[in-house]
Image: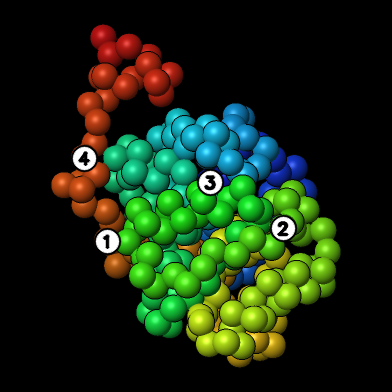
Amino acid sequence: MRIAYIVPGVGLDNEELIRRQEILRSLAFKGTEVDVVSVDEGPYTIESGFEEEYAAVSYLRKLYEVEDYYDAFIIGCFGDPGLRAARELVSKPVVGPGEASYAIASLLSRKFIVLTPLKSTVTITWDQINMYGYTGKVYDVIPIDIKVADIQRDREELLKFIKNSVKDVLSEGKAEAIVLGCMSMGFSMVDLDLSKDLHVPVVNPVKISLKLAEVLAYIHLTHSKLSYPTPPLDKIRHLLHLKPNI
């Protein structure tokens, strides 16, 4: 089984790409190969709607190019940029970490909170929650006020920021689980420590999206083409930089 984790942007240096690939491979089931696939365009980080829109198209050409080599794909951003387009473009399973995390959190709790990096990403996250239909399950979206690029610089500081951000909500019984609403938070691997200290489930989108991709590939399930119809290749050939069909 081969899984591709596609990064929609250019903000991660080679060292960080390798680190994330090693984490994914350590989490994968025996026999699963996981590659982090990078692209040559897109934003450095996604902290605004503008950057999210650019990220949504940054990886589609690469996705099309490597489809035959992989059994499932993960979009490497919690905002799931371009998820519909990706599912239309390919027939293999494409997992959006945000969509997957909300689904799991809704199974584990009646109400949950979503942590997001900045105040500027709160409305983006609420729009995503509303689109997926989880508004009634989310108590709040809480910013931890750390830029995406800075999240992994100090793990202990990140833990402190998160605990301070959620302690009142949890102590008052307003929510019963936490979703880490950023892949950089996920790759900080703080979920187990947080769950132990806060006594609630903490959903890590890195783990959830990988395991869902593996399950879908293993049982040969993918998205419905009635829901995500394939666009006519001749019409979009120039967008994928393909040679004219002669």
- State which tag comes first along the sequence, 2 or 3: 3
Query: What kind of residue is marked 4?
Result: Pro
- Residue at screen point 59% across, 32% down: 42
Q: Which residue is mark 4?
A: 229
- Residue at screen point 43% across, 51% down: 127
Tell me the quarter of the image containing the C terminus. top left
Q: Position of residue 226 (x, y in %)?
A: 16, 47
Mark 1 → mark 4, Cα distance in angstroms: 16 Å
- Kindly check if marks 2 and 3 are in contact, taking CB atoms under 8 A apart as contact: no
Q: Position of residue 211 (x, y in %)?
A: 46, 69
Secondary structure beneath dot 2 equals loop
Query: What kind of residue is marked 3?
Result: Ile
Question: Left or right: 129 with respect to 199?
Answer: left
Q: Which residue is mark 2?
A: 145
- Residue at screen point 72% across, 58% down: 145
- State which tag comes first along the sequence, 1 or 3: 3
- Of marks 1 and 4, the one in the foreground: 4
Residue toward you, 244 or 45: 45
Q: Which residue is mark 1?
A: 221
Mark 1 → mark 2, Cα distance in angstroms: 38 Å
Secondary structure beneath dot 3 equals strand
Q: Which mark is residue 170?
A: none
In this picture the colour scheme is rainbow
Q: Position of residue 1 (x, y in %)?
A: 43, 60
